[in-house]
Every structure is written in structure tokens, then in C-alpha cells.
Image (cartoon, rainbow, N blue to C red):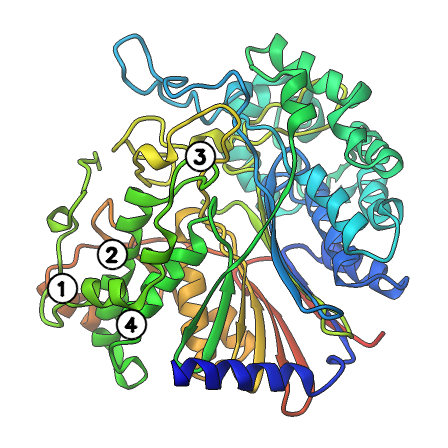
Amino acid sequence: MKRLLAIAFALACSAAAGAGPGKHAVAAAHPLATRAGLEVLAAGGNAFDAAVAVSAALAVVEPYSSGIGGGGFWLLHRVADGTTIMLDGREKAPLAAHADLYLDASGNVVPRLSIDGPLAAGIPGAPAALAHLARHYGRLTLERSLAPAIRLAREGFEVDEKYRRLAGWRLPVLRASAAAAEIFLLNGEVPPAGYVLRQSDLARTLESMASSGAAGFYRGPVAARLISGTRAAGGIFSREDFEQYRVVERSPVRFVYRDMQVTSVPPPSSGGIALATMMHILEGFDLPAAVGVDRKHLIVEAMRRAYRDRAQYLGDSDFHPVPRELLLSRAYAAGLRAGIRLDRVTPSASLPGAAPVEGADNTTHFSIIDAEGNRVAATLSINYPFGSGFVPPGTGVLLNDEMDDFSAKPGVPNAYGLVGAAANAIAPGKRMLSSMSPAFLETPSRLAIVGTPGGSRIITMVLLAALAFQEGGSAGQMVALPRYHHQFLPDRVQFEPGAINPGERSILENRGHVLEARERPYGNMHVVVWDYRDNSVQAASDPRGTGMASVASP
């Protein structure tokens, strides 16, 4: 307890030492979104205004990753009063949804029903979150902060190779929606590189939000078109779904690892609790002294146990009791740690509660700090690339397929291989469990704002970056770090090129690990670091992606 109090005091002193970094920094997944944030900051906005601008711009230029037809989590810290909260703009199940929504008459999951088309969509949360950010935290009007996105939607932007690759992968589902095909394809095919994609319907929907706030999306003509278009194609949206949607401000998950305070997101995200479980387990080992294969073995075993708890216990805490205090306790982590052997793997099937299982890059993230020290870490998603692939005619809104993040049936994996139990079963109005893990990391000398897309691998990517930061890593080192991942089931270690060398692989396999080499790198992390010692600011975007990080004077 004394150690925790000393760390908390040191962190408080470091934060109070100056008024702020004196510089703005934005790191986002697309250069046009980063520029939108910088534009709003230059116009007198703060980090929260910039977050609105970046979120909306990403919705336009990264339709395969996020959008106003989706949702997300915005982790906020306001300097003026020390407020730190998670703004929950996660999608909700329609009121007509039920636990057997994606099962056939025999009780089996119908393939792709929770992934493709309007029945896969939850009620979007992003529009309500942006209006809430502007009204309660920003300095500028919502209209001003949405202006860059409206301009991008109306004037267009050039599609790149990532757009073309993901559009090609989702080509059949985009073709199945006439409105989606008209917007995102060219004569039914993937448009060529350099094609200027214009989204006039989306521009009008954003203008409705700019003039009327959340009501411009959830009520009136836009809502009517969203509901009628979805229902005509087999969806179950209703007027009550839209009128009843609300964002929620939630207390973040906070814990200390060595000398670093970690602030991340609570349920309906699994990120904060899973990070705490992993880091509390690892705290009992001399991890900084562990090198090579021993370090990776210990980290993988911590990942395995945290993802088992994710599958067993986590869901929307408004609907299902989550044993948060237990899962965040060091005593509980010590019990999990006691089962870890350095010389041998613990098979996932031997852990309590294991469910039998038959054996993507999407989502997006940005990190922002303003000159005063206000900060935002936000991870946003529509789930699968291009979400459900469905656009209600006349709206320009590409709907999410976040309903796949529910457990359609206990023990049956979703599109990312994640399994779940009753805690994450479908229920009317319920928020589906997420892996999105925006985080603030603070040592006595530095602060990092971090997050990444990557589906089920998000939490482990943030873990590896957090461990690197605590051991002195820079923003650039955090985003470039080679990545590996274990998620309890399927029982295998996934790793990207360069993360595990042949010698390490042989040793890990001898200890019982099953390894799966991925051909492509994964993730798209964006980090801002403020060093209190010299008041310097670093910003870095993942070299695996096409994002841009920029530091600017006010």
C-alpha cells in the first residue's frame, strides 16, 4: 500500500509540475484525419474538439475501419478539473434482438448471419458520442468540428491500396447492398488506385448532425431512412431503438504496474480488466530481467489466463454482474500466477471453464494531447472490414456488424475466434463485449496515450507496448515492436514476421506451445508520449499502416 501511495503521489506531482506540454500532438490512422484534428486545434479547439474532428474524418476516409454507423470508446482526461472518464459509445443490440437471433431451428449458428447484412448491425453509438464530446467537453461547436469531415465527404479523397484490398475482400457483401455498391465500388468492382471517392449522402447526414446534434441522427428524416431501409432488407431496427440510445460515462479501470499507473476502459470493454490481470500476473516475475524465450513464455501464459477470464466472466455490466473487484485484485492474479511453470506450457483445456472449440485488420485508433495537457485515446470500430456491408438508401451510413461480438452460442467462436459465455449473450438493448483498449500510461517522468485496432489481438498489442513504455521505450519503439498473441482458445500463439525467431520457436514448441506464423503484420498503433522532464512531446504512427503523427505548436 505504501508503494502505491508513493507512486500516486509522484504521478500527481509530475502532472502538476507544469500547465501542459505547450504543444499539440495528433496520431491517427489516416493523414487526412490527423490534419482534420490539427485544423480544429489551430482554430482554438481543445483535444476533445479535435477528437470529434478526427473521429468524423476517419468515418469518411476509412469506411473499412470505423464510421458513424458504428461506435467506440473515448478515454478522456480533462486538465481543468482532473476528470478522467471513458465515454461509452458502444453499439447496442436492437430491442427486437434475442439470444437465439443467429441460430437455426436446430439450435446451430447460421454462418455469416451475424457478419453480413442489416441483421448483423447494432444501434450505432458514434453520433451520440461525438455530440456529447462537443457539448460537454469541447470549446467549439459541433458544426465547426465536423466541418473537415463534411468537406472530405463532399469533395472526396483518393482511395489507396488498403482500401482496395479490403474492398476486394468484402466485394460480395458490398455488391449485395445497392447503396453500398454505388458508394464504395465503381460499376460493381473495386475502384482503381487514385479513384476519388465522394459520399454526398454521408455529407448530408453529417450536416444534419452539425445542425441538430444527436437528434440529427437518431430522430427525424435521417433516423427514418435508417430504420425503413434496414427493415426493408431484413433488419430489425425500430424508432424506439434510436430514441432510447444514450452514451454512458463510465469510471475507467485503474491499476499500477511497478512504477506505472495504467488507465484503461471498463466493461463493456474487456481491455482494462484483461490488461490488469496480465500485468498483475507478470508483476510477480522479474520481467525486465527476463530475456528472449523466457520473457515470451511468461507473457503468453499471462495472456492465456486473462483471455480465459474474458471468455468466462466479461460482458455488459449493466446486464450481467462482472466480478470486477476480484478480477482486478492482486491476490486473484497471484493465484493465477501460481500455476505458471517456466519449463512447460499450461494447455488451455486444463484451465477451469474451457469450452470446446473447432479450430483482420479493422477498427481504428487515434491519440491526442493539446497544449494544456487535455488528452484523448479513442478506439472506434464497425467490426469487420466495411462492417455489415449494408448502407440504408439515402443515408450514406455504412452499418456495423458488431452483433458478431456477442456470444451467439456459448462456446462457439466469433469471426475472431473468441468464445464467450452467458455474460456476453445477446439481449435487447445490451452492449456487446469489446476488445478495444485505449489507455493512458503514466510513470513519474512520462505519459503515454496509446491504442490500436486489431480485433481480438488489441489487448495483447497494448500489453506489449505498455511493458515497453514502462521499461523506457519511446513512442516510435512502442508502435514498431514485433507482436505475438494468445487468446486462450484456439490454443496457439500467433506471431507476426520477426516476432519469434527460429531458435525461440523451437524452444517454445519443446515447452508445449503451438505456434502459428502470420504472413502479414497486424495492428495499427498510434501513440503520443509527453516527457515531463524536458516537456517534450513525441508522436508516432505504426509503420505497418498509412497513418500520420504530428506535433505542432499552438
Location of residue 116 in the rendering, given as x and y in whole percent from the top left corner: 49, 23
Residue occupying the point 21% across, 36% down: 357
The mark that comes first in sequence, 1 or 2, is 2
Mark 1 and mark 2 residues within 8 Å of each other at the beta carbon: yes
Q: Residues within 10 Å of mark 3 (few under 14, many from 20)?
A: some
What separation in Å lies between label 2 and label 3 (alpha carbons)?
24 Å
Q: Which residue is mark 1?
A: 339
Circle 2 SS class? helix
The mark that comes first in sequence, 1 or 3, is 3
Kind of residue indicated by mark 4: Leu
Q: Which residue is mark 4?
A: 282
The mark that comes first in sequence, 2 or 3, is 2
Q: Which residue is mark 3?
A: 319
Q: Which residue is mark 2?
A: 305
The mark that comes first in sequence, 1 or 4, is 4
Q: Residues within 10 Å of mark 4 (few under 14, many from 20)?
A: many
Q: Nearer the viewer, residue 203 or 302?
A: 302
Kind of residue indicated by mark 2: Arg
What separation in Å lies between label 1 and label 3 (alpha carbons)?
32 Å
What separation in Å lies between label 1 and label 2 (alpha carbons)?
10 Å
Q: Is residue 7 left or right of residue 152?
A: left
Residue occupying the point 70% across, 49% down: 55
Front: mark 1 or 3: 3
* Residue 163 in the image: above or below residue 426: below
What separation in Å lies between label 4 and label 2 (alpha carbons)?
11 Å
Front: mark 2 or 3: 3
Kind of residue indicated by mark 3: Phe
Q: Nearer the viewer, residue 19 or 227?
A: 19
Mark 1 and mark 4 residues within 8 Å of each other at the beta carbon: no
What separation in Å lies between label 3 and label 4 (alpha carbons)?
31 Å
